[in-house]
Amino acid sequence: MYKKLSFLIKSMRPTQWPKNIVVFTAFFFSINEGWNFTDSSDVLIKFIQVVIVFLIFCFLSGALYILNDIKDVGFDRNHPFKRFRPIADKQISKNLAIIFSSSIILLLGCISFVMNKDLAYCLFVYSIITLLYSFILKKIVILDVSVIAMGFVIRVIAGAIILGVPISIWLYLCTGLGALILAFSKRRVELILGGDQSLEYRSVFKYYSLRMIDYFICLVSASLILSYSIYCYSASNLPDNRFMLITIPLAIFGIFRFLFLLRNGKVKVQPEDIFFRDKILLPTIVVWMITSISILYLYRG
């Protein structure tokens, strides 16, 4: 029984759960607006609420991953890495996986409804588009990566809902564009690794080429830089002195560093992992966060 449970948890892909950290976007950017450091009890309550939403998305996305693996079991067995997943490797049965996944989704739905009805609706929409992706949309070029980006935006919306704070439309756009870069990067890495065999595990690759993907990545990266710059300059709830403009060079450097690593083969199948592995990119992100927090804390309100 313990062995089966460990295989089920592995099928939930906990290594991909860190991407759910985007639910903290609203918490991060609402310093001295939705909460402040002087009220420690309020900060703790709001932080715990966001942590709970983070965990909900971890388990919900994990349960949906299981359903996706059941649907793609034939393709996964031809994939150089995915063939070792528990369902593709026949370590757990499809029926057990379906029961386990469905139970988690139902439980999370009940928990979220008790917490906040709008959050429950948000999770429902996320689940629907994820299932549509697994069964239909992943086969449609461009739309396959767009749905992934939409999932990240929904995570940000969920974080804002539980805190009850509004955030700029430009931040939603930045989230979606950043997710698009990661999604296209993943397609690029898979296409290189799979070569002529790529179609055997992802049918949409018949529409993609490295040149096309590189073009899209460049276009989306430029759009992300522009969107973040507009946010820093024009967002109504930022400090009037526009000191947030200071963070733009850090954001640009971080994006360029990621693109450099991508073109030099340093980015793997899970592109977001590079944020924690690269000795230059990680400090850049930390400095950007510290700078942003300092500006919002000192000059907002």
Image (cartoon, grey):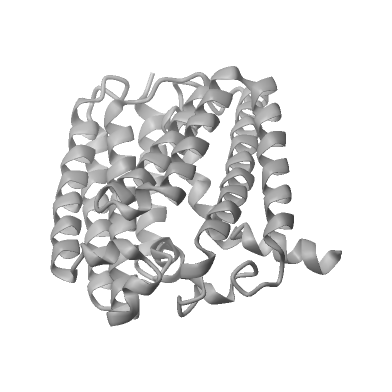
Image spot of residue 262 (x, y percent): 27, 70
Q: Position of residue 173 (x, y in %)?
A: 28, 36
Which residue is nearer to you in this view: 57 or 259?
57
Q: Is residue 179 left or right of residue 223?
A: right
In the depicted view, which residue is nearer to us: 76 or 220? 76
Q: Is residue 183 above or below residue 296?
A: below
Front one among 194 and 282? 194
- Quadrant into which the N terminus falls: bottom right
Quarter-of-image position of residue 107? top right
Residue found at the very far right of the displayed protein: 1
> How many dots with numbers?
0
Q: Relative to 16, does residue 210 appear above or below in the rendering?
A: below
Residue located 27% across and 66% down the image:
205
Any part of residue 288 in sight = no
At 50% from the left and 68% from the top, the residue drawn is: 74
Does 29 sit above or below residue 260? above
At 71% from the left edge and 60% from the top edge, which residue is drawn? 8
Q: Quadrant of residue 93?
A: bottom right
In this rendering, position of residue 157 left or right of residue 94:
left
Question: On the rendered image, what quadrant is the C terminus found in?
Answer: top left
Residue 141 visible, this orientation: yes
Where residue 156 appears, as percent x and y from the top left, is 44, 35
| Residue at 59 percent of width and 18 percent of height | 117
Q: Nearer the viewer, residue 157 or 71?
A: 71
Residue 41 is situated, as x and y percent measured from the top left of the image, at: 68, 24
- In the rendered image, which quarter is residue 108 located in? top right
Q: Taking 39 as reference, is 263 left or right?
A: left
